[in-house]
Amino acid sequence: MAKPDLVELEIEGMTCTACARRVEKSLNKLDGVTAYVDFATEKAHLQLSNPVALDVLSGAVVSAGYQVGSDKSETSKLKPRLIVGAVSASLAVLFAMVPGFQFENSQYLVWALATAVVGYVAWPFHAAAIKNLRHFDATMDTLVSLGSTVAYVYSVFLILAGDHHTYFETAAVVPSVVLLGRYIEVKARKSATDSVRALLSAIPDRATVEIDGNRQEISTAELKKKMIVLVAAGQAIPADGKLLSAAATIDASTLTGESLPQEISTGDQVTAGATNLQGEIRLEVTAPAASSRLARIADMVREATAEKTKLASLTDSISKVFVPLVILTAILTYIIWSLLGDQETAFQAAISVIVIACPCALGIAVPMSLVVATGVGTKRAVVIRNPDALRSLARTKMVFFDKTGTLTDGNLAIVRSVGLGGVSAEQMLEKAAAVSAGSSHPVSKAIAAVTSQLAVTNVSEIAGQGISGLVEGISVRVEKPGTYENQLELDQALAAAGPNTLVVVAWEGWAHGLIELSDQLRPHAKQAVADLQTAGFSPVLVSGDNPGRVAEIAGQLGIKQYFGSITPEGKLEMLGQHTDPVAMVGDGINDVAALAKAEVGIAMGSGAYAAQAASTITILDDDPRAIPFALRLGKKTYRNIIENLVWAFGYNIVLIPVAALGLLNPILAGVAMAFSSVSVVANSLRLKLGSN
């Protein structure tokens, strides 16, 4: 089945999560379109199962009452309104409330200033309220629009009736202050997603290629496999490729977070987005930009920022009930105070209820935490693909590890070698390396890494056994242990060997060497396990490898619980025995089921794509230290979300009764309401502090 095309649209005019859901609903009505609209990043993420014209997509957005974004940023569009609001609201307060600035008929100047605010500054709130009304909906913007409009209209009525005591200053201050809070939110959201944007823009737009000996510059999107690319010093590498030059020094910090440059040589793989630091280099493209490792990482980051969460849906659902209840409370407040004979308090209290209840903080409580966490994680090569897992992560205490490719590097290397039959280990390894150089088998490649100057001929594979070749006129075999003239000596060497892959090097009927091969612990694996244990997690090692090797690795890492020869089905069964949420760390196809089964699946970036797709968190640079970091970040993010929600709801619950009792001036209510939103943003940004 063909993979759906992915399209991303900027959406203008959204003011809350309900707006995002409205655009999403309209886009999903189109045939072949699966959409998710993320309010935090103001983007629509679309999967198209069949081609859909851009004007059709734009039409769906417009029909919902919004627009596909232009190049003009939201902050630049808010600035003029913010300036007008700040000046007009400040002057309105001075002329309406400070005796020293008042003069005869100054109320008409205040009226004019309030008109500028209500008509221009507050228009985004009015437009959103109208859209909500068209869809028989009420959101946070409904309260801002209603509060300022009611205050303005009632003030016009009072001034025409000859009453100089009006609420024009309230009508001017409330939308201006709310707009300031929104401006701060937009700036904070932009800051929180800067690292993500930097990642997505790491691949250059143009590339220099060599075709028939001639250089020419083409679009990076036109690169194809086998093309030869030339990258000058200081330029970013446009596609994944194989180095053809003798050597190169590259900066891959965009992908790995590692600040030290990497020294590579001919045949080594380079990744799109890395920077060439010294001299021009030549590459053979192995994967074009669209399917490069960086492009796949970008897809994961987009998924992370666009992932719909049950928590976000919960806040939307609550808002649908909350806003009508607030309006009803305001009406009841007005009626009760009117029955008590105090019309002025009745109006003021009703307006205060509407203003103080405006739950802008509620709308950003979840997405702000997720966007900041995504930015923090990306800097440390951690992508949270499914934020819903954060809830389970907060209660996770046990972490299951696959061994190969996760805590070990998955690459065979010689860990021990012994010379037998009167031959030194060095002599034996040189002959073995010469024979193995012509084979692509992982064992042969590991042995061939030993330098050998010996010439070899007549190399042939021995099916299921090993490889042989003629070295200096002697037939040398590199094979699985068998029967030899010096069997007793070999048996003693075998008994002393560890639980590793064993290879015998033999010639003329004698075993002249025993080579032990194994994959090695990843750098920092010990530190990662120690960090997990310090943080209160219990690590468990489960592997399909032989129990002896698993026990050895567990001992090196200080893991007390370990199991070997575990099948994929066995891993599933082990996970199913735990009622509390568990995390599973893996990288291969054989780990996919377990990663999907675990409440928190963590995949290594170099592993199988299927494993990454089944996981909720991906470690992009394969550094095991990122695992405890990811778990800590998940717990912190979930706690941050709860703090934001408690703040947003608690703020409304406490202050609505205060406003209904007539104890809160509408202007102060507007200031406090904006402060609530800013506080939620500030609390979310705390995730950036101390994240290590």
Image (cartoon, rainbow, N blue to C red):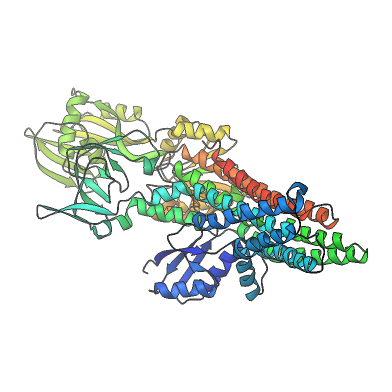
Q: Does residue 84 sit above or below 497 in this rendering? A: below
Residue 258: image location, x then y, percent = 38, 36
Q: Single out the residue that lies furthest toward the right.
A: 340
Q: Does residue 272 sit above or below 540 in this rendering? A: below
Residue 532: image location, x then y, percent = 54, 36
In-image side of 635 versus 333 (left or right)? left
> In which quadrant will I find the N terminus?
bottom left
In-image side of 142 versus 383 (left or right)? right
Residue nearest the viewer, comparing 320 with 667: 667
Marker count (numbered): 0
Residue 153: image location, x then y, percent = 74, 68
User: Which residue is rendered at x = 56% and y = 63% of the image?
Assistant: 14
Residue 580 seen by the camera: no
Residue 677 seen by the camera: yes
User: Which residue is rendered at x = 56% and y = 40% of the image?
Assistant: 632
Residue 101: image location, x then y, percent = 73, 49
Q: Single out the residue that lies furthest toward the front.
A: 104
In-image side of 398 versus 288 (left or right)? right
Q: Single out the residue that lies furthest toward the left.
A: 473
Residue nearest the viewer, comparing 318 with 530: 318
Residue nearest the viewer, comparing 654 with 420: 654
User: Which residue is rendered at x = 17% and y = 44% of the image?
Assistant: 244
